[in-house]
Amino acid sequence: MADLRSDTVTRPTRGMREAMAKAAVGDDVFGDDPTVNAFEAYVAELFGHEAALFTPSGTMANQIALQLVVPAGGELLAGADAHVVTYELGGAALYGGISTRTWGSEGAALDVERIAAMIRPAGYPSVPTAAIAVEQTHNLGGGGVIPLATLQHLRAVADAQGVALHCDGARIWHAHVADGVTLAEYGALFDTLSVCLSKGLGAPVGSLVIGSRERITRARLIRKRMGGGMRQVGILAAAGRYALDHHIQRLTEDHERARIIAEALAPYGVVDPEQVRTNLVPLDLSKHDLDAPTLTARAAERGVLISAMLPRVARLVTHLDLDDASMDQTIEVLSELLA
C-alpha cells in the first residue's frame, strides 16, 4: 500500500528506536525525567521562549495553550477552517469555557485588517476578545504558509489591541524549511505555540506547548487535570529530539515529492502545483465527476491510501516513509481514476 493519508503514519527509524532505547528516564509527574526536562528546555530555546511542556498530542497542546491565553468566558478568534475549531471536538468550549468566533475560510491567506475589525475590546457589550489563533502551516489550507510579513502585521494588531496570539504550529517545521524563517523568528511573534513531533518529523507521538515560564507552570497543572501527566516520558522525548536533530532539513524532500505529484495531477484540473508549498497536496474535486469519498475508496481498492477531508476535497501527504515506488504507484492510480 502507498499510504498518503497523513504524515502521522510513519514508523520510527532505526536510529530513533536506538535513541529511545538508550534514553535516561525518571518520573515526569515528579519532574525528574532528565531526558524530557532537557528536551523541553531545548525546544523552548529553539523558539526563543522561556519554557516548554511535553504533551501526548497536538490537540492537548493546543487546548492547554488556549486556556493559558483565554480566560473562561473570554473569546478566541480563529479561522473557520482552523484545526482548533474543526478537529478538536469543541475542546475550547468544553475544557476552557472559551467562546470562539471565526472569520471565513481563507487558509494561509489571512486578511489581517479583517481580523482586526473583529476584535471586541473589554467593556464592549459582548464577549471581549482575549486571543487570536493561527495555524502554520495550514492543514485545510493545503499546507499553505502564512508569510512572515503577514504574521508581523498580525502581531502589531494584537499588541495594539491588547490580545494574545497563539500559533498552532503542528507543521511549523515545514514553514521554516519552505520560507527560511527561523524558528526563533516565529517564536518571537507568539505568546504561546504548540508544535508537533509526529507530523512530518517521524516521531511516534508527542507535541509541546511553548511560552513563558509562568504560563508553562500553569500548563503543567492543566495537563495533569486533562489526564496528560506521564511517567517515564523520556523515551518519547528522546524520539522527539532525534526527529529534530535528523528530520527537519530532509522535509525539503517531502516538499519536492508533493510538487511532483501536484504537477502530475494538474492536467486533470484538480490542483495548482504553484499552490503546493509544503508536503500537502489538496485535490479540489468541485468540478470533477468523482467526490472525495468515492475517489478515496477507489484509490484504496488499488493500493493507494488518501484522505477525504471534505465532500469535494481529497488530500495527499508526503512523508519520510514514502519511497519512489509508492510515488509512481500513487501517480499512476490517481491519474487513471481522475481521467
Image (cartoon, rainbow, N blue to C red):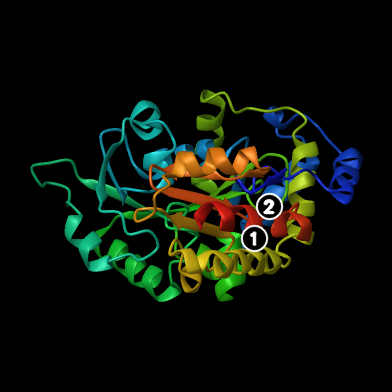
Name the mark on residue 45.
Answer: 1
Q: Which of 14 and 282 is in front in this view?
A: 282
Residue identified by numbered label 2: 41
How far across and down, in percent of the image, does residue 195 sit?
Answer: 57, 51
- Which residue shows up at 43% across the image and 72% down it? 147
Residue 50 visible, this orientation? no
Residue 256 in view in this figure:
yes
| Left or right: 223 as drawn, with respect to 322 | left
On screen, residue 145 versus residue 207, left or right, reads left
Q: Splitting the image into 4 quarters, where does residue 207 fall?
A: top right
**Nearer to the camera, 118 or 291:** 291
Q: Position of residue 35 (x, y in %)?
A: 79, 43
Mark 2 surroundings: few (<14), some (14-19) or many (≥20) residues within 10 A: some
Q: Which amino acid does label 1 sit on?
A: Glu
Secondary element at tag 2: helix
**Is label 1 in a helix, a strand or a loop?**
helix
Residue at (83, 35) in percent of width and height: 25
